[in-house]
């Protein structure tokens, strides 16, 4: 790992960075310092402000207040190209290059060597080969970029950025689609670039990688700076507490509600059994059993693999390893239609983009899954649709109680209840809820929790993903803890509490590290 160089002025200094969108503060007076030769992790949960900081510093969006200096010189780029010209380069998770062009063409895009107005293709390939050699890439620069792995495409994007005289390299989730070997290749390149004096900002959700490659860590939460630490001086438990915004003592005090639900774990019959179920590069193989009347919680930091696991269980992503049995019979879950046929339901986290159809009525949204299961040649009669909609509007107290109102006009909590109604109308035996209480008001939050308990008592098997650890321990019979897209612990019965979940997320550090 590189060590930061000591200069009079830091390589990149951000002071008091502030940005609001429609009156909502996304960044509030954030400071950030990057030294030359340093690999610096920028961490935080959803909505922490990481993406806004990157976009503001690199000119994608304009800042409301604050200063940015590079080598002591104030900069205010108004576009990504201007940021690149100033020495700031960003490589995103989705590589922003052209797969149909050759590697050499991508490296020299918009700056091709020419003579008499004609591109010198031979010279471009020779120069590209020399650049690639510096990154240990023994590939033909004349081949299409799309013919190469995601890891190679990332390295080509980084090589292009560095060759454009980048002083600061921002890597936004570069390892999300890479396997362990590819990650180590990327890390070797990062260490080599840092040793040459580049400053690298590394945005990731993989904590093992943070401790493997970075020199310092900065944590944002709710648009504010929580703190910066030398990586070697920050125990994992303290890092997780900084990201989640709770101390271990508070968590322990809040983790033992008197009415915690525990009855289903030992009594319910098996509905679904997954054995070594997984998909390489997506989620590591896992074992999981779902029982009637039981709530299984999925806990972990953002990017730990919770949503990916849910999508595999529901067939939204097809598993490539292992096997599944539902009601005792082997099944293949190739698509959500297969899961729906076996009476599974799934309420996604992104309800506005993946759940509701905003322009359609509450009635249309509620009957959607049931109609999909019946198929296009067995339409649900309008009278039956209206009866279903009114039944669930009353049952879930959806407000206003108007089945013909466009669902996009409802509050977030009522949209969430309408999504629950959609799946309840199919009479599911397994219901997967991804962040069911995120972004809704306190009253609706309490209603959703009450419904989870009620559904479980009715014999439904529930899989619930939640970032609210104090919430999940109030209703979960079991909590599966995930880290780096791998299931690393299962807590059952009275062992389910916030302290135990935090320790599992942090890893095998001694308790005093907290």
Image (cartoon, helix red, strand yellow):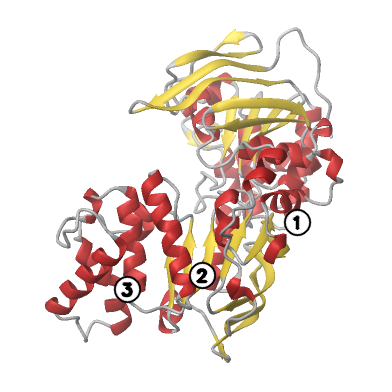
Q: CA distance from mark 3 to mark 1?
A: 39 Å
- Residue 314 location, x and y as percent? 49, 72
Q: Residues within 10 Å of mark 2 (few under 14, many from 20)?
A: many
- Please state if 310 lies on the left or on the right of 493 as rendered: left
Numbered badge on residue 439: none
- What label does residue 369 carry, if any? 3
In the picture as drawn, the residue positioned furthest to the bottom comes out as: 329
Mark 2 lies on residue: 462
Which numbered circle lies on residue 180? 1
Query: Looking at the rendering, which quadrant does residue 395 occupy?
Result: bottom left
> Image height check: is 25 above or below 268?
above
Q: 311 above or below 305?
A: below
SS of the residue under disc 2: strand
What's the distance in space between the residues labelled 1 and 2, CA to CA? 33 Å
Of labels 1 and 2, earlier in sequence is 1
User: In this rendering, would 67 be left or right of 176?
Assistant: left
């Amino acid at each position: 790992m590189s060590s930061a160089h000591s200069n009079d002025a830091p390589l990149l200094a951000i002071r008091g960075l502030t940005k609001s969108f429609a009156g909502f503060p996304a960044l509030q007076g954030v400071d950030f310092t990057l030294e030359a030769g340093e690999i610096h992790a920028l961490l935080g949960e959803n909505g922490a402000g990481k993406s806004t900081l990157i976009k503001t510093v690199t000119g994608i969006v304009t800042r409301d207040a604050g200063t940015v200096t590079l080598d002591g010189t104030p900069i205010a780029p108004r576009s990504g190209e201007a940021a690149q010209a100033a020495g700031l380069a960003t490589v995103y998770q989705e590589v922003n290059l052209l797969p149909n062009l050759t590697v050499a063409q991508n490296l020299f895009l918009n700056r091709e060597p020419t003579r008499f107005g004609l591109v010198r293709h031979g010279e471009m390939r020779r120069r590209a080969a020399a650049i690639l050699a510096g990154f240990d890439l023994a590939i033909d620069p004349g081949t299409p970029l799309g013919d190469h792995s995601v890891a190679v495409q990332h390295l080509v994007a980084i090589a292009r950025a560095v060759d454009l005289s980048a002083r600061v390299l921002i890597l936004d989730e570069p390892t999300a689609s890479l396997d362990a070997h590819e990650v180590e290749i990327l890390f070797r390149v990062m260490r080599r670039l840092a040793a040459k004096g580049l400053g690298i900002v590394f945005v990731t959700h993989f904590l093992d990688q943070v401790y493997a490659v970075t020199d310092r860590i900065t944590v944002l939460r709710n648009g504010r700076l929580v703190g910066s630490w030398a990586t070697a001086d920050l125990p994992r438990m303290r890092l997780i507490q900084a990201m989640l915004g709770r101390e271990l003592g508070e968590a322990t005090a809040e983790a033992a509600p008197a009415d915690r639900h525990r009855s289903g774990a030992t009594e319910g019959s098996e509905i679904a059994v997954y054995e070594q179920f997984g998909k390489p590069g997506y989620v590591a193989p896992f074992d999981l059993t779902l029982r009637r009347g039981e709530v299984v919680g999925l806990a972990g930091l953002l990017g730990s693999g919770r949503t990916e696991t849910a999508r595999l269980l529901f067939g939204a992503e097809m598993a490539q390893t292992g096997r599944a049995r539902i009601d005792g019979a082997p099944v293949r879950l190739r698509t959500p239609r297969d899961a729906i046929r076996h009476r599974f339901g799934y309420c996604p986290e992104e309800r506005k983009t993946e759940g509701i159809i905003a322009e359609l009525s509450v009635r249309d949204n509620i009957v959607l899954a049931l109609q999909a299961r019946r198929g296009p040649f067995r339409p649900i009669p309008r009278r039956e649709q209206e009866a279903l909609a009114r039944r669930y509007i009353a049952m879930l107290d959806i407000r206003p109680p108007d089945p013909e109102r466009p669902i996009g006009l409802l509050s977030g909590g009522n949209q969430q209840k309408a999504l629950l109604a959609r799946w309840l109308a199919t009479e599911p035996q397994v219901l997967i809820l991804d962040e069911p209480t995120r972004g809704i008001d306190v009253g609706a939050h309490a209603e959703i929790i009450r419904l989870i308990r009620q559904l479980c008592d009715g014999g439904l098997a529930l899989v619930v993903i939640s970032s609210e650890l104090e919430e999940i321990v109030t209703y979960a019979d079991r909590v599966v803890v995930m880290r780096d897209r791998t299931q690393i612990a299962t807590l059952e019965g009275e062992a389910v509490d916030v302290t135990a979940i935090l320790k599992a997320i942090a890893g095998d550090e001694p308790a005093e590290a907290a």
